[in-house]
Image: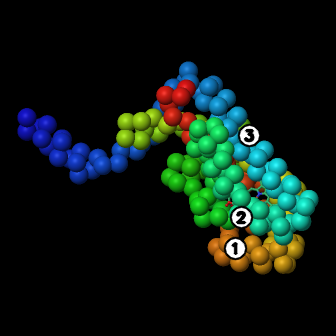
Amino acid sequence: MKKILVLMASSVVFGCAEVQKVEVPKNKEQKIVQVGEETSMKLLKTLKGALMDAMQKGGPDEAVEVCSKKAMALTSQIEKETGYSVKRTTFNYRNPANAPDKYEAEALRYFEESIKKGQMPQYYVQAINENGKVMYRYYKPLKVEGVCLTCHGDPNLMDKKLLEKIKALYPNDKAVGYKDGDFRGVVRVTIPADKI
Ligand code: HEC
């Protein structure tokens, strides 16, 4: 009895938010990858479509406005459509809302370390137990392409007015200085275990 009381007391003190990593069941991985890939591609297609549209219509100046005003709204729209939480995240973020949490940081380090060893994994999967509810997380790596350099490239080579506009919107911007082919970050898709 005494033991039980002590256990109960310690879980009241320490156990309010129980969040911890757990094993991804091997027989679930294929389905997680399939759902994660579909959902992340949906987000990327939507965002890239909006970006290219704005670049064609009004050039990079207008596209920056579109990115800053629409990227988060389009992300929420994809969450509503698919029912899964999605996020773009990176260590070098422009929008502070995209900063990584502890588990996202682990996924980012996994890709960075693999790249150092000359590998480029297609994805990374985690399982996290949040207060008894298991959530799978699928991470898709993102690479920088030519068109991205307009707004994420070497600041010395970027259009001065555009750079000023970006700095005014994001005073602590970390998302410049990239080269074609660089690892930029990930798309994270969270899938509740009972959906798989
Ligand atoms: C017209 C300028 C512009 C171009 C071109 C552009 N971006 Fe961005 N990007 C932004 C802005 C502004 C934000 C911050 C707003 C947001 O998306 O949350 C951003 C944010 C991001 C983020 C979210 C993380 C963060 O830093 O906040 C990723 C990932 C990203 N861009 C990747 C890319 C990739 C990959 C390309 C090329 C396919 C690209 N961007 C092209 C302007 C641009």
* Direction from residue 154 to residue 169 in the image, left or right: left
> Can residue 53 be seen by looking at this rendering?
yes
The residue lying furthest to the left in this view is 2
Whether pointer 1 and pointer 3 mark residues with C-beta atoms closer than 8 Å, the reply is no
Q: Position of residue 188 (x, y in %)?
A: 62, 45
Against 115, is 71 above or below? below
> Which residue in the structure is indicated by mark 2?
68
Q: Is residue 144 left or right of residue 196?
A: right
Amino acid type for the residue under numbered disc 3? Met
Residue 140 visible, this orientation: no
* Front tag of 2 and 3: 2
**Amino acid tagged 1:** Leu
Give the labeled residue for mark 3.
41
Front in this rendered view, residue 173 or 22: 173
| Quadrant housing residue 6 | top left
Residue nearest the observer in this picture, 64 or 92: 64
The dot on residue 169 is: 1
How far apart are the two marked residues, 1 and 2, measured between alpha carbons?
A: 8 Å
Q: Residue at x 69, y 41 (%)?
A: 40
Mark found first going from the N terminus, 2 or 3: 3
Ligand 1 near label 2 (Cβ, under 8 Å)? yes
Q: Residue at x 89, y 65 (%)?
A: 58
Q: Amino acid at mark 2?
A: Ser
